[in-house]
Every structure is written in C-alpha cells, then in structure tokens.
Image (cartoon, helix red, strand yellow):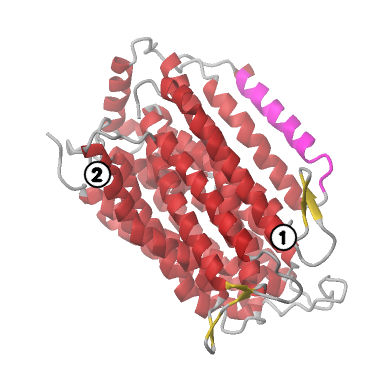
Amino acid sequence: MAQKGHPKGLYLLFVTEMAERFSYYGMRALFTLYLVAAFFNSADASQIYGSYTGLVYLTPLLGGYIADRYWGNRRSIIVGGLVMAIGQFLMFASACFVQQSIMTEGGAIDPSVNNSLSLTLMFIGLGALIIGNGFFKPNISTMVGDLYDAQDKRKDSAFTIFYMGINVGAFIAPLICGPLGNGDWTNPSAFKWGFFCAGCAMILSVVVFWALKNKYLKTPDGLQIGLAPSKSELRSQKDAAEAESIKDSKTEEVKNSPLRLWGCVIAAVAMVVGFSWNAENFNDYISAAIYAISIALPVFIITDKGLTGVEKSRIGVIYIIAVFVIFFWSAFEQAGSSLTIFADQQCDRHIGDWEMPTTWFQSINPIVVVTFAPVMAMLWEFLLKRGIDVPSPIKQAIGLLLLAIGYIVIAVGTNGLEGNAKASMWWLFILYFIHTLGELSLSPIGLSMVNKLSPARLASLLMGVWFMSNAASNILAGNLATLLPTGGEPKSFCGFEIATLTDFFTLFAVMAGVAAVILFCLYPVLKKMMKGVE
C-alpha cells in the first residue's frame, strides 16, 4: 500500500543541507568580489572561482569512496562539516589581515600592497572547504534515497523537496552575508563578517545532524541508514536484493588486477600532461587534472570485473547524462562569475533612488527554487497518478532547453548595448527565473536517477561521479567566463566570435539548445540501457 507523506528523516536532511548551503552560498556570493577587491583582476578572479568550484565538486569522489568502504555516510558528513567550518573561519582570518589592492593603469596589482599572508590563509581555507565538501556532499544526497524502498515512486518528489533545503539556505545566505561582507564595496576587510557568519552556519549544520540522526534516519522497516558498511543491515539487504533481481549477476566478488588501477593512473597522468601542455598558470593545471580525472575514474569504475552486465548498462546511463550535465552547469554557473560581474558593472540596478546590491542577485535563483520546487514535485506526482511517468532523461532535456531560452532572453535584452550604456536588471531577473525552472527539471531529478541506477555498494562513489561532472563544468564555466567582453579586442571560442554581450549570451544559448535536442533524441537508447528503472 502506498505510503502518505514523506519520512521525517527527509526533513532532518533538509535542515542539515539548508544550513550547509547557507555556508557555501554565503561565501560564494562574496568570493569573486573579494578576489577582485583584494588580489586579482576580473578575468583572473573568474578563473580562480572556476577552479575552486570545480575542485569542490571533484572531491566528492574521495568522500564517496571512503564512505562506501570505511566510514559510512553519517561519519563522513560530520567530519566534512567540521572541516568546512574550519575553512570558513580561515577565510574570515584572511579578510582580517587583508589590505585594499591598488590597480595600476596596465591592470596589474600594485606591488607595494603586500597581501601574501591573507592570500595564503585564503588558499588554505579554500583547501579545507574543498576537502570538507567532498565528505559532506555525496553522502547526504545518498541518504535521501536510502529513506525509501527501492521501487518507491516518491523519490523524484523527495529529492525535489530536499532540493528546497539547498535553496532555502542559498536564498538566505546572500541577503545576510552580502550586507555583512560588503559594507564598503572597495574595502576587502569588510568581507570578514560574511565569511564568519558562513562558518557559524556550518557548525549549526553539524550540530543539528549529530543530535537527531539516530532518531530519524531510518528506512521504512526501521533500519538505521548511513552506518559504516561493517555495521549496516540495510547495505546487506540491498546487496542481496540486487543479486536476486539481476539474473546474470555473479554474486561472488571478483578481485581486479592491479594492472587495471595502474593503467588508469598512467592514463590520467598522460591526460594531465596533454591537457596542460600549453598551461600559462596554476589554474590551467587544476583544469587539466579535473578533466583527466573526469575521464579516467569513470573508466576505472565501469571496467570493474565484479559488475554485471545490467549494472554496467545502468552506470553507463549515469555517465551519458553526466556529459549533458556538464553543458548545463557550465552555462548555469556563470551566475557566480560573469553574470555577477555583468550585474555589478553593466546592469542598471536602481529602483527609484535605491540601488540593489549586486550580491542580492544570488538570491533570485534560490527563492524561485523554494517557491516552485513544491509545484514541480506536485506536477510530477500529478502526472504520475494519471499514468504519465515523465522519464528522468526527458526531464533533464527540458532543463537544458529552459537554460537555452533564458540566455536567448538576455541576449535580446542586451542587443545593441554600446559604450557605457547599462542593461535593465529585469532582463537578469527573467534569466534567473527561467534558468531556475530548468535547474528544477534537471538537478534534483539527476540526484534521484543516480540513486536509483547505482549498485548499493557503489552508491556514494557514483554520487561522487555525478558531482564530478559539476567539477568539469565549473572549470569550463570559469574558462568561458573569461570570454565576457570588456571593451577590448573581440574574443573567439571554437570559431564563434564574441565582440558584444549579445554574442556572449548567444554562445550559451546555442550550446544548451543543441545539447537539449541531442538528449531528447537519445532517450530511446537510454531507456533500453536503464533496464526497467525509470
């Protein structure tokens, strides 16, 4: 008999993720502006932002692997949260010692301003945030799916509700951390209280999770979820169920040759060398490493001799969709770099005599998510009750299409903009609204899909692979953000000349639109590969 409502554990994970996302998005709203105020020009700041967010989404691979093999989800979340809190407080310390940078006429930083201590503290803080997120991110997402039976049709709506938690935190954070961090737009030391507030939110996240985890994080049968593999009854049941349901399964574990591991390592190193052959700075090496790992690790997983044919086919679907996700997030994540710079420098943000703070634009996306996530969840359930089960790949193709439409809108809004003229900020509002609807069609559905298609023993690791596509897309987003026209010579990308803002936004519209059409066309193939899982 179908159960009514959702388990209470979903709302505990909702609140935990909400506090953690407050921490992340509070820092994210400030980060590019802090870099420009204290250390770098806008192009370098965009690349550093891309490298940071790329690494944030790469380390879930490590966190997922450790959780699957040793710690379990719960311990990984607590450790990750504490490490991230340390990272935020190091960012606070960086801003305590920073001095205002002075730009020379050539666009370089005046060497008389010595911010080496602040820069060092900032990079150590970023490292802690990156590592901590790796333990936190894949494991809390995996636990959402574990609250439900394997065939429970409420999973898509559950992940959409969970996604609200992400965006409640993301909505509140810029409104609080923004004013705290930007009392004076030109004074980088004013950012410190925004970073401090983000660190306090991270501590709150860990405390709430630790206090209530044993009471609410259970399966419908009362089994505790998220325990270490050696203690998990749920893990044993899921592995046994998978072996029973997959007729061609080899139930014994097959030991893999060390040659397979070393082959993938050597291939990854070779790709790093190839991708970084013409590297000009440290960010280029980070980009090369992320691209290489994004290729080598999925190959390593799929060539595991212990996987059955059905498991490999389903994992293949995750990989294929992840490629399209790269196109989505590389365009969507312009919000934290080029679109932030565009809002700050080339948007008329006045309503009467009041000027809207740039950081507040970061709250448009989450407030739309919070408002419309329940609507989307009810829409999928409404269609399901009437026998219309929209497949996950189709929902994600719709998300890509909406992304393209958003960029078409702002391309029209900036058409003919010249000189010091500024675009109306309402075009940016419309873009964020449409993009958010696209995000709701793609991101929570993707989390649900990974949970449904992953073998139990690889659930957190494959969630890490899913986030790895975000890593590659954020690196690509940082590189694409450097194409933002700044009044100099036209720039080019793959034969596409970018001389105006309209050209810049049209590039993303074309990229997302083509990806959407291809994904729609691929659905029949993906349906066969999913082997009965929708």
Calculate the distance from the C-alpha at mark 2 to the C-alpha at mark 1. Answer: 42 Å
Three-letter code for the amino acid on which mark 1 is drawn: Leu
**Residue under circle 1?**
484
Q: Quadrant of residue 457?
A: top left
**Residue under circle 2?**
382
Foreground residue among 44 and 111: 44
Foreground residue among 206 and 315: 315
Question: Is 266 drawn above or below residue 331 in the view shown?
Answer: above
Q: Residue at x 47, y 57 (%)?
A: 434
The reply to whether the magenta stretch includes residue 265 is: yes
| Residues packed near mark 1 inside 10 Å, few (<14), some (14 to 19) or many (20 plus) | many
Span shown in magenta:
260-279
| Residues packed near mark 2 inside 10 Å, few (<14), some (14 to 19) or many (20 plus) | few
Q: Of label 2 and label 1, which has the lower sequence position?
A: 2
Front: mark 2 or 1: 2
Left or right: 3 with respect to 465?
left
Three-letter code for the amino acid on which mark 2 is drawn: Phe
Left or right: 28 with respect to 249?
right
Q: Residue at x 37, y 64 (%)?
A: 204
Q: Is residue 89 visible?
A: no
Residue 302 location (% of width, % of height): 53, 22
Q: Is residue 220 visible?
A: yes
Foreground residue among 161 and 231: 161
The C terminus lies in quadrant: top left
Q: Quadrant of residue 478?
A: bottom right
Instruction: Looking at this view, name the residue that lies furthest to the left.
Output: 1
The reply to whether the magenta stretch includes residue 354 is: no
Q: Residue at x 48, y 70 (%)?
A: 174
